[in-house]
């Protein structure tokens, strides 16, 4: 889990980091590629001690860690991905330790003061309002989650006739992006 935490601390303020849990390095390939091998890992039934893995992770990670598992099939192989939001406001810690990637190694962040200073500089300059809040959201879900009537009322504009017009206005104000990702608010 230190590797995952290290990745979140490497990319503060950016979109979710997706980690595939079922790949094998193809070491002889150039450039380096991965082979999809599939997995039997089931995040819904796996336990650490007597605790379900998701609940256990919530206890072990710092309170700013936001993650979710998802699964699917690629080329006939069952795959599982872990999507985790990068560090925001402070480093993401695992068992009260912040980690960072140094080359191909995962190390405690405190062991590298210059890198730690750079990470904190990125974290303090990251813009929450410019970050994506939700991804892959349908148009109907966007319209359900936002109070669009209030939005147009506050702008002093009549409510548009079609969903496409509503979404166009939301996109112009950076509240929603064309691939229907939700933004925290860029303006």
Image (cartoon, rainbow, N blue to C red):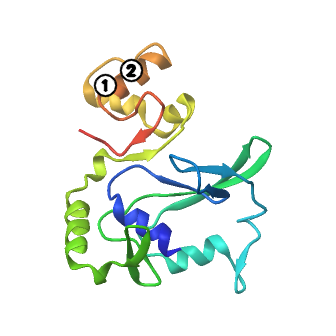
- Residue that label 1 marks: 172
Q: In the image, 30: left or right of 12?
A: right
Cα distance between the residues tagged 2 and 1? 6 Å
**150, 9: nearer the viewer:** 9
Q: Label for residue 168?
A: 2
Q: Residues within 10 Å of mark 2 (few under 14, many from 20)?
A: some
Q: In the image, 43: left or right of 146?
A: right
At 22% across and 79% down in the image, what residue appears? 113
At 53% across and 74% down in the image, what residue appears? 1
The image position of residue 92, as x and y in percent, is 39, 71
**Residue 30 against residue 148 in the figure, above or below:** below
Secondary structure, mark 1, is helix
The image position of residue 99, as x and y in percent, is 39, 75
At 30% across and 70% down in the image, what residue appears? 90
Q: In the image, 179: left or right of 87?
A: right
Question: Contact, CB < 8 Å: mark 2 with mark 1?
Answer: yes
Q: In the image, 179: left or right of 123?
A: right
**109, 184: nearer the viewer:** 109
At 26% across and 67% down in the image, what residue appears? 119
Quarter containing the C terminus: top left
**32, 81: nearer the viewer:** 32
């Amino acid at each position: 889990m230190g590797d995952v935490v290290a990745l979140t601390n490497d990319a503060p303020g950016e979109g979710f980091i997706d980690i595939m849990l079922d790949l094998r390095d193809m070491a002889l390939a150039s450039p380096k590629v991965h082979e999809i091998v599939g997995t039997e890992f089931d995040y819904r039934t796996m336990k650490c001690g007597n605790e379900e893995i998701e609940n256990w992770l919530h206890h072990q990670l710092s309170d700013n860690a936001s993650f979710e598992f998802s699964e699917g099939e690629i080329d006939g192989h069952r795959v599982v991905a872990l999507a985790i939001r990068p560090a925001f406001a402070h480093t993401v810690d695992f068992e009260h330790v912040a980690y960072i990637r140094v080359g191909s190694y995962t190390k405690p962040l405190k062991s590298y003061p210059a890198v730690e200073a750079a990470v904190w500089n990125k974290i303090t300059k990251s813009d929450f309002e410019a970050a994506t809040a939700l991804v892959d959201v349908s148009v109907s879900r966007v319209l359900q989650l936002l109070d669009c009537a209030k939005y147009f009322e506050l702008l002093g504009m009549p409510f548009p006739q079609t969903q496409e017009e509503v979404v166009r206005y939301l996109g112009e104000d950076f509240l929603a992006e064309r691939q229907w990702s939700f933004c925290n608010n860029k303006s």
